[in-house]
Image (tube, grey):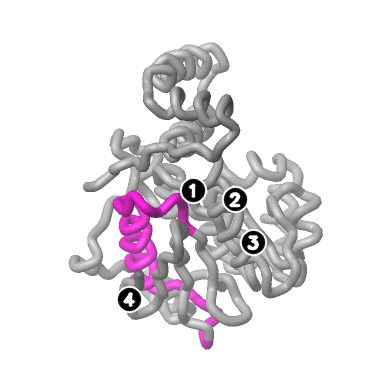
Amino acid sequence: MTQIYEEIRYEVEENVATITINRPEQLNALTDLTQAEIRHALQQSEINPEVIGTVLTGEGRGFCSGVDMNALGGMSEAGKRLGNSYEHLAARPGNPQGDSNYESSPAYFLGLRKPLIAAINGAAAGLGFSYATFCDMRFMAKSAKIVTSFAPRGLIAEHGTSWMLPKLVGPSNALDMNWSSRKINGEEAFRLGYANRLCEDGECVVDAQQYLKDIAQTSAPMSIMMMKRQIYKHLSKELGDAMNESNVWMDESLARSDFKEGVASFVERRSPRFEKIDVSE
């Protein structure tokens, strides 16, 4: 299945969706349209019961170089954020509980009900770096580079990275990455804990897609969805509160057919046949 967009490609193969930012001449810099199309495409993944998760990557030699410089120039002239609306692309993917923490971009990635993996095939800078940071996992090519890019532009740590990045790499490394704005390659990103998988050049998209295909064969879609919800909701909760909420959700999972199927497939030594989840909006 292929959905037609102007600045991205959206493709579904088997049960994995792939969003490719398709502005290679601009190193996949983000315009308002690009961002609206990504949000809309993620909603297509959410409402398609056949899709287990989505891979986000860039066309050509870059993942995403940040906000398009023409847009940055306009912001500098105006002294404020600018924005265009694309009503035909209006979308609110995920976040069925309406949690205000998951409303802004790219924090809304955390409210998606399905996995989102960044396949960092090349340079990721500025908002592109933030996009990768808020994905659930990062598969990064050895020669790819990440850079915050905020301090050299006279900016602060933008787009929620001051909250998310220290949780991935620790406070000191997060400060170093922001203060120095130095380029960090895949191998260092992997050592820091930013990249979850270190991939050979040209392989990160396939590796990320295969990861999703593999968990689709072994893990219940409902379990995947609930675990993502647990992880992000409980990041900022006291342990006792997190335990109490998890106990409630555990009781609910014990009553679902997935639990019976999981036990039966183990006993019968066969692949599980879990129910797909219908999250139509």
Tell me which corner region of the image, top left, top right, bottom left or bottom right, holds residue 180: bottom right
Contact? badges 2 and 1 (CB < 8 Å): yes
Q: Is residue 94 above or below residue 245?
A: below
x and y percentages locating residue 26 in the rendered image? 52, 83
Determine the secondary structure under disc 3: helix
Contact? badges 4 and 3 (CB < 8 Å): no
Split into 4 quadrants, where in the image is the N terminus? bottom left
Q: Is residue 172 above or below residue 58?
A: above
Earlier along the polypeptide chain: callout 1 or callout 4? 4
Q: Which residue is mark 2?
A: 137
Left or right relative to 228: residue 143: right
Residue 28 vs residue 174, the one in the foreground: 28
Contact? badges 3 and 1 (CB < 8 Å): no
Whole-number angstrom distance, CA of label 3 to CA of label 1: 14 Å
Earlier along the polypeptide chain: callout 2 or callout 1? 1
Left or right relative to 169: residue 96: left
Q: Residue furthest front?
A: 268
Contact? badges 1 and 4 (CB < 8 Å): no
Which residues, given as a range, are shown in magenta?
25-54
Tell me which corner region of the image, top left, top right, bottom left or bottom right, holds residue 89: bottom left
Amino acid marked by disc 4? Tyr
Q: Which residue is mark 3?
A: 207
Q: Residue furthest bottom?
A: 25
Determine the secondary structure under disc 1: loop
Whole-number angstrom distance, CA of label 3 to CA of label 2: 12 Å
Whole-number angstrom distance, CA of label 4 to CA of label 2: 25 Å
- Report the predominant secondary structure element of the magenta stretch: helix
**For the residue carrying disc 2, how many other residues have a C-alpha within 10 Å: few (<14), some (14-19), or many (20+)?**
some
Determine the secondary structure under disc 4: loop
Q: Which residue is mark 4?
A: 5
